[in-house]
Amino acid sequence: MRVIPIQPADGPRNNGRQATADQTYLDPQMYTDPPPKNNRPILVNGQALNLQDIAHEAQNHPMPQHKPGWAWYAAAQALVWRSLFLQEAAKRALQPDPIEIDPGKWETDEEALIRQLFEEVIPPADIDEAQLRAHYETHAERYRGPSLYEAAHILFMAPPDDQIALAKALKEARAVSAELQHKPQRFAHLAREHSDCPSSSQGGLMGQIASGDVVPEFEAILQELDEGQISAPMQTRYGYHLVRLDQRALGQPLPFESVRPQLRQAEEKAHWVRAGRAYMQQLLDENEIEGIDMTLSPWAEVEGHE
């Protein structure tokens, strides 16, 4: 079972306790070392984690190849959270009531207990309609109907996981971009000559594009360009593009009532995250955890890893 905790707002703590000779507090050096090979326990209120369970759980925590110990560490922390949640569910005498999460796929009893625990401890969000409206009025530009674009592009195709092909595509895109800086009127000719997109036969013309018609990273390029401007080489999942924006028609502003459900959903999610973090911090403050430093967050470091 994979457990991905919400990180407490100020970072988890071990109640200020220091490691003693008979405790196993994992050292940060393990982030660069192989997983530990000792049998000293990690304890959650005196309940030891099984090392085989940690090794199995580590498969659910992919980490950079040069940090082999991170997966083990993240797995151990995840199992500490699971143990805390299940112990709390037992204290509250919760009985598992699994729900169907996908067609034909149901929660396990443990997953159901953890969900039920959070449903019990997190109160419903108290949403202030006036604050929602104030947010809408402050950020009205974010809430528009679909925009329309007329654009052309030159695609230098390369798979996202092929570094050699990407480097070749970028080199070619830069060469064509340099030519366009001096002769932008040659865009259609260069598209026919170089583009890997079927639109090359039309000089790169893509016709009318509505929001959502293209992949998000390509639409982001269109949003940044001025009419008549040609982009520098820009990467998407298909390779590198030179994009020319010919026309843009912004979508009409949406009324508050039409975006109100979206705003409520966002506020409910934010409330759940805040309350969940606070509850998890409370668990760390009120329970005895030995043998692991819960202040270290290998998954957070991986998210920032380049």
Image (spheres, rainbow, N blue to C red):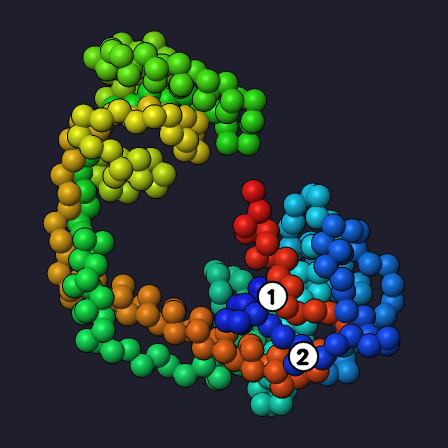
SS under mark 1: loop
- Quadrant where the image shows the C terminus: top right
In screen coordinates, is 123 left or right of 36?
Answer: left
Whole-number angstrom distance, CA of label 1 to CA of label 2? 25 Å
Would you say residue 163 is visible in this rendering? yes
* Number of residues whose C-alpha sits closer than 10 Å to that of mark 1, classed few (under 14), some (14–19) or many (20 or more): some
Q: Is residue 89 above or below residue 300?
A: below
Provide the residue designation for mark 2: 16
Mark whose residue sits in front, 1 or 2: 2
Q: Is residue 71 above or below residue 257?
A: above
Q: Position of residue 217 (x, y in %)?
A: 36, 38
* Number of residues whose C-alpha sits closer than 10 Å to that of mark 2, classed few (under 14), some (14–19) or many (20 or more): few
Provide the residue designation for mark 1: 3
Q: Position of residue 198 (x, y in %)?
A: 33, 19
Disc 1 marks a residue whose amino acid type is Val
Which residue is found at the position 52% from the left and 61% from the top? 104
SS under mark 2: loop
Which residue is found at the position 50% from the left and 24% from the top? 166
In screen coordinates, is 211 left or right of 36?
Answer: left
Q: Nearer the viewer, residue 160 or 294?
A: 294
In screen coordinates, is 139 left or right of 217?
Answer: left
Which residue is found at the position 70% from the left and 69% from the top? 293
Disc 2 marks a residue whose amino acid type is Gly
Q: Position of residue 305 (x, y in %)?
A: 57, 47
Q: Nearer the viewer, residue 267 or 170?
A: 170
- Quadrant where the image shows the N terminus: bottom right
Would you say residue 84 is visible in this rendering? no
To which quarter of the image does residue 75 belong? bottom right
